[in-house]
Each structure stands twice: as structure tokens, then as C-alpha cells.
Image: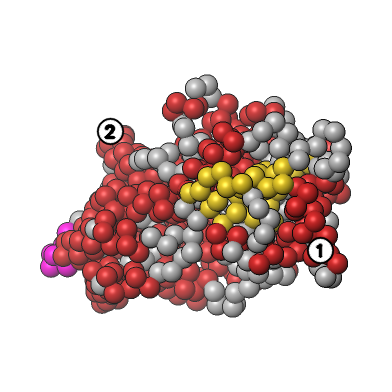
């Protein structure tokens, strides 16, 4: 029996180990290098980090809490993982900023995604691929170098963890189907349960849409059904993931049901929340940006998948082991269709599609047949143009960086230009263009690596230092003022933040913070909350009671402090950092000003329920 000449020359076990080691080293360098050297970035990451740390401190591993309130927006897996990091001893020495523990779940999820992408291609290479090990590395890097992945893998939220667990589950399902044996079919459903414990039922919905599209394309519903055993699989997923939901509903009751299922799941799909209103075509430009500058290759790979739908009958004759690119296309389309239909749209919603995009890019970048060669050459030329445009834009940074105007970072343009980091990034992309064009002149195996190598260097020598610069300009003042709060606060003295609302102040002080905006109603709210609000770790007391503090510490930004209704309160200024000032304010003066405002018709608003209060 003769061997199939188009079958991939799969590497030996030793070659696979070497390939996986290369991917592991790259993954650790990209995602873990200096991961904890910067503080948490407001607004959302400190809420996750504070909830995870609270679990470790209080021993309550059931309900995530932040700033004295339950946080029902996400299931507990990401908080559990963060909490385990915070529970490790001597954290003040190895994690002084509290960011290693908070960011490590996101970073490790992306590391694992790179490894599972590489392992899948090392064991199930694309048909006709003479260099599967290089293809595996390029696919892993195509995922890692996505702008969305680079950002969210270093951010203390749950999006990267969802992307990683969902990718592992879907790739396990495809590998089970491709092998034809149905071995370890249960593994994918166990991992899917982790995805459900990361972000909720959306993981099951995305899996279902992906498998339905793939079954329609392959016209092989029976083969998928036998290989994956979805009824038994969903039962496994439910047995692992549902106990937490049941326990939380039993303990917290209706507020959990209304917030998690009503607001954070159903309402996000059916209506716009948090002003995240976007046009229906929002994810088209997100798709373009998320794979830039390799978007032309992604579009080429996706176009082949869409064309395959029209010739679905011919796919029935294609071995299941050769269907990985088609599965990746269905996976990407599932994310696109679901979140395009959703009313609330955010760029981070695209993150679960990035592993599929990486597979499509790696598939399209391989040497093509004569029939496909013209389209591939066009995609390579467009990739070179995209990279060149990016490099030119970075070289032109002295023209557009001064246009950046952010009141929270007034010195950013000057410091960014003085650092030379943008020019350093421009050089990396210029080298990528030159190496990429050079690779087009001959049949260079793993041609995509010519582009990717300089981009890995960009991550290490330009992007990470840019993040550190941004932290110094934007977040360091918050940490400095938090340190002053800890040093200056008297026993029982309440703490408030007015104007610019930074959850990281709560994280770094370890105190419940009363947050209010800059309006006149915010001042009236603050005075009333200090007397009447109740939350875990904070009990408002009227100033006249014996145990009540006569003063309140107020962190206020200078723009808010200059407003007329905050004038004339005679605060004692204790410290300042960046745009922030720390006041000790006499509550009697605050209450008198609030009474005057209420006489003028200002209404209290703090008692109105808000789903995402902190």
C-alpha cells in the first residue's frame, strides 16, 4: 500500500518535544516577562483582583466580593485562581504590587492555548504540509501576536481565561472527531465546564454553534454525534459547573439571579448595557485589527472555508483528519454570529475567536497549489503593505502623539516621545517588512516566521516598556495617594473618592471606599452615605453618634476640587500625587453644604439600585 503523498510528514516524538519546548519558551517570554512589574490598570482589573484577594483573606470562596459588596458579574473560576495566588505566603515580597497573582490566570491561559495549538498541529498537521513543526510554531505565534491577545493576556480579567478554556475544549473535540476513535471524548466536556465557570453559559452556546456549523459543512452529524457524545458530555459539564450556581443561588437568592443571569447574560444579549452601543458591523473592524498585520492571510483562509460551504458535498470525501481549517472557520464564524447578534458589543468579546484565527492564518500561509498560488501571493503582498503602513505610522509618531489629550495622563505625550519606544517599535516592524519581502523571493519554509520574529522582539523591547511607562504616568499616582491614605487614616475614619473613580484605591488601601462622581448630587450623596449606608466592612454612622468619626478622608482630583460646590469647605490637605489630592474634611461642614444643596432642589440618588455598583 503506497503512502499518501499529500499527507503531512508528522514529526517524531523527539521532534514534537523540541517543537513544544520552543513554543513554551516563546509563550513564557511573551506573556510572563515582567508580568508583575506594573500596577493594576483601572477600571475593571482591580475589581477582579480585589474579589480574588478577598476570598483568600476571608476564607469565603463561594461569593466574590469587592469593596464590601457581592460581585455577581462573573462565575468564580477566575477569582478562585487569583485567590490561590494571593493565598501563597510572603506575597508582599514576591508580588508587592499584587499583580502577579491577579494576572497569572490570564497569562497562563494564553500560554496553554499556544501549547495546545502547537500540539494539535504537531499531531494532526495540515494535508500537504512538509514542515508541520514550523507551521505549529507559526500558528502559536499568530495567536500570541494578536493585538487583543497581547493586551488581555496581561490584564487581570476573565476574558483570556475564557478564550483559553474554550479553545482547549473545542480543540479536544476536534481531535476526538479527527482520530475517529472517540477516545477521551469526556475530556473536552470537563474543560467546557471550566469555561462555564469562567464566564457562564456563553461557552456552551459558542460550542453548540461551532459544532452545528461544522456538522452542516461536513454533512456528518452522525460522525460528530458518535465521536463527541454530546448528551453525556453536557451532563458531565453540568455536574461540574452547576453546583456553584446552585449554591450561590441558595445563599444569595434573587439578587444573584437578577444580576448574573438577568443583567450580565440575558440583558447583554438583548439590550445595551453600560453604554456599549455599537453598530451591527462592529466586529468586522475588530476582526481586521485583532489579526493585524496578518489580516489578509486570515481573510484568505476564511474565504476558503466559506467557499467550502458551497461545495460541502465534496467535503464528505475528505478525511476527518484534514478538516482542522474548516473547524477553525466554523469556530470563528460562531463567535462572529453570536456577538454580532448581541446588543452589547465589546472588543474583548472577539478574544475567543483568536485561536481559530491563528489556525486559519497558519493554514493560509502554507505553500499553495498552482490554482491557489495567485491568491496567496496577493495576501502576502497585502500583509507586507499592512506592516509597512504600521511602521510608517509609528515613525510619524511625533506628528500624532502630541494630539493625545488625557486629563489623567497629562505628561504622557512628552514622556512617550522622549522615551524613544515608539521609534523602537517602528524599527521592529520595518525589519519585519524587510524579512517578509525577502522571504517572498524564494520557497522559504515557515515564511510567516520571518514576519513574526521581529514582532516577538517588539513585544519584549517596546510594548512591555510602553506599558510600564503608562503605569508610571497613570497608575503610580493612585498608588502613592493610597499609601498616604494608609499612613494618615485614623481609626474608624471613613474614606471616599470623588470625581475620578478608581477601584485600585480600594485594592491598595484594603479599605472600603465610598465612591461618588463630581456633580452636586455626588456631594449630597456622600454626606448621606456616611451616615446611613451599610455594606460589609463599612457602617455609616450619623456624626452625632459617639462612635462616629467627625472627619472623612477624601481623595479628589483637582478638576473636581475646582468646582464651585466643593469650594469653601476648608479641608486639611494632607498629600497630593499626580492629579489627586488627599483631604481630611470636617463632616459638619460637608453636611451643611449638602443640606444647602438639597434646599436648592438637589436630590439624593445613591439609594437607586445599580447592577455594577462598587
In the rendered image, the residue lying farthest to the top is: 89
Q: Position of residue 140 (x, y in %)?
A: 36, 50
Q: Position of residue 181 (x, y in %)?
A: 52, 42
Q: Which residues are magenta?
A: 437-444
Q: Which residue is mark 2?
A: 14
Q: What residue lies at 83% left-to-right and 49% top-to-bottom? A: 255
Give the left or right position of residue 260, taking residue 557 as reference.
right
- Model colouring: secondary structure
Q: Which residue is mark 1?
A: 596
Q: Position of residue 5 (x, y in %)?
A: 27, 55
Pick the residue in front: 109 or 517: 517
Q: Residues within 10 Å of mark 1 (few under 14, many from 20)?
A: few
Q: Position of residue 133 (x, y in %)?
A: 28, 46
Give the left or right position of residue 31, taking residue 44 as reference.
left
- Quarter holding residue 449: bottom left
Q: What residue lies at 46% left-to-right and 53% top-to-bottom? A: 578
Amino acid at each position: 500500500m503506497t503512502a499518501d503523498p499529500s499527507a503531512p510528514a508528522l514529526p517524531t516524538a523527539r521532534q514534537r518535544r523540541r517543537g513544544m519546548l520552543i513554543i513554551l519558551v516563546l509563550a513564557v517570554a511573551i506573556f510572563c516577562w515582567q508580568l508583575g512589574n506594573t500596577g493594576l490598570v483601572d477600571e475593571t482589573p482591580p475589581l477582579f483582583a480585589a474579589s480574588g484577594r478577598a476570598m483568600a483573606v476571608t476564607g469565603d470562596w463561594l461569593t466574590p466580593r469587592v469593596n464590601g459588596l457581592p460581585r455577581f458579574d462573573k462565575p468564580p473560576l477566575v477569582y478562585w485562581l487569583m485567590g490561590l495566588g494571593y493565598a501563597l505566603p510572603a506575597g508582599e515580597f514576591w508580588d508587592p504590587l499584587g499583580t502577579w497573582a491577579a494576572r497569572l490566570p490570564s497569562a497562563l491561559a494564553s500560554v496553554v492555548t499556544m501549547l495546545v495549538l502547537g500540539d494539535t498541529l504537531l499531531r494532526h498537521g495540515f494535508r500537504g504540509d512538509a514542515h508541520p513543526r514550523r507551521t505549529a510554531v507559526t500558528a502559536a505565534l499568530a495567536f500570541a501576536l494578536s493585538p487583543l491577545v497581547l493586551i488581555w493576556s496581561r490584564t487581570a480579567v476573565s476574558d483570556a481565561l475564557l478564550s483559553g478554556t474554550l479553545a482547549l475544549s473545542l480543540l479536544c473535540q476536534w481531535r476526538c472527531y479527527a482520530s475517529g476513535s472517540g477516545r477521551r471524548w469526556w475530556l473536552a466536556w470537563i474543560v467546557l465546564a471550566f469555561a462555564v465557570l469562567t464566564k457562564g453559559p456563553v461557552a456552551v452556546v459558542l460550542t453548540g454553534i461551532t459544532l452545528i456549523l461544522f456538522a452542516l459543512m461536513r454533512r456528518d452529524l452522525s460522525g460528530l454525534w458518535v465521536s463527541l457524545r454530546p448528551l453525556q458530555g453536557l451532563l458531565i459539564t453540568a455536574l461540574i459547573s452547576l453546583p456553584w450556581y446552585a449554591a450561590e443561588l441558595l445563599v444569595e437568592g434573587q439578587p444573584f439571579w437578577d444580576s448574573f443571569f438577568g443583567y450580565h447574560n440575558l440583558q447583554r444579549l438583548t439590550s445595551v448595557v453600560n453604554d456599549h452601543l455599537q453598530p451591527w458591523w462592529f466586529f468586522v473592524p475588530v476582526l481586521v485589527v485583532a489579526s493585524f498585520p496578518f489580516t489578509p492571510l486570515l481573510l484568505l483562509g476564511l474565504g476558503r472555508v466559506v467557499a467550502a460551504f458551497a461545495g460541502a458535498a465534496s467535503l464528505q470525501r475528505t478525511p476527518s483528519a484534514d478538516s482542522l481549517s474548516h473547524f477553525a472557520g466554523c469556530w470563528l464564524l460562531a463567535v462572529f454570529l453570536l456577538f454580532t447578534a448581541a446588543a452589547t458589543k465589546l472588543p474583548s468579546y472577539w478574544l475567543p475567536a483568536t485561536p481559530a484565527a491563528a489556525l486559519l492564518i497558519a493554514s493560509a500561509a502554507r505553500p499553495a497549489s498552482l490554482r491557489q498560488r495567485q491568491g496567496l501571493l496577493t495576501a502576502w503582498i497585502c500583509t507586507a503593505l499592512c506592516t509597512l503602513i504600521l511602521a510608517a505610522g509609528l515613525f510619524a509618531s511625533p506628528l500624532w502623539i502630541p494630539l493625545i489629550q488625557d486629563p489623567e495622563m497629562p505628561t504622557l505625550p512628552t514622556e512617550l516621545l522622549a522615551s524613544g519606544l515608539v521609534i523602537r517599535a517602528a524599527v521592529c516592524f520595518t525589519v519585519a517588512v524587510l524579512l517578509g519581502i525577502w522571504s517572498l523571493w524564494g520557497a522559504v519554509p515557515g515564511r510567516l516566521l520571518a514576519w513574526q520574529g521581529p514582532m516577538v522582539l517588539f513585544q519584549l523591547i517596546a510594548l512591555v516598556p510602553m506599558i510600564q511607562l503608562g503605569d508610571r504616568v497613570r497608575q503610580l499616582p493612585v498608588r502613592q495617594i493610597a499609601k498616604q491614605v494608609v499612613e494618615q487614616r485614623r481609626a474608624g475614619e471613613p474614606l471616599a473618592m470623588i470625581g475620578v473613580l478608581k477601584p485600585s484605591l480600594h485594592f491598595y488601601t484594603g479599605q472600603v471606599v465610598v465612591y461618588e462622581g463630581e456633580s452636586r448630587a455626588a456631594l449630597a450623596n456622600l454626606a448621606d452615605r456616611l451616615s446611613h449606608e451599610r455594606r460589609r466592612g463599612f457602617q455609616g454612622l450619623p456624626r452625632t453618634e459617639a462612635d462616629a468619626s467627625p472627619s472623612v478622608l477624601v481623595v479628589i482630583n483637582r478638576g473636581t476640587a475646582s468646582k464651585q460646590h466643593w469650594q469653601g469647605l476648608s479641608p486639611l490637605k494632607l498629600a497630593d500625587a499626580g492629579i489627586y489630592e488627599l483631604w481630611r474634611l470636617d463632616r459638619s461642614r460637608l453636611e451643611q453644604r449638602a443640606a444647602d444643596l438639597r434646599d436648592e432642589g438637589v436630590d439624593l440618588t445613591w439609594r437607586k439600585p445599580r447592577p455594577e455598583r462598587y
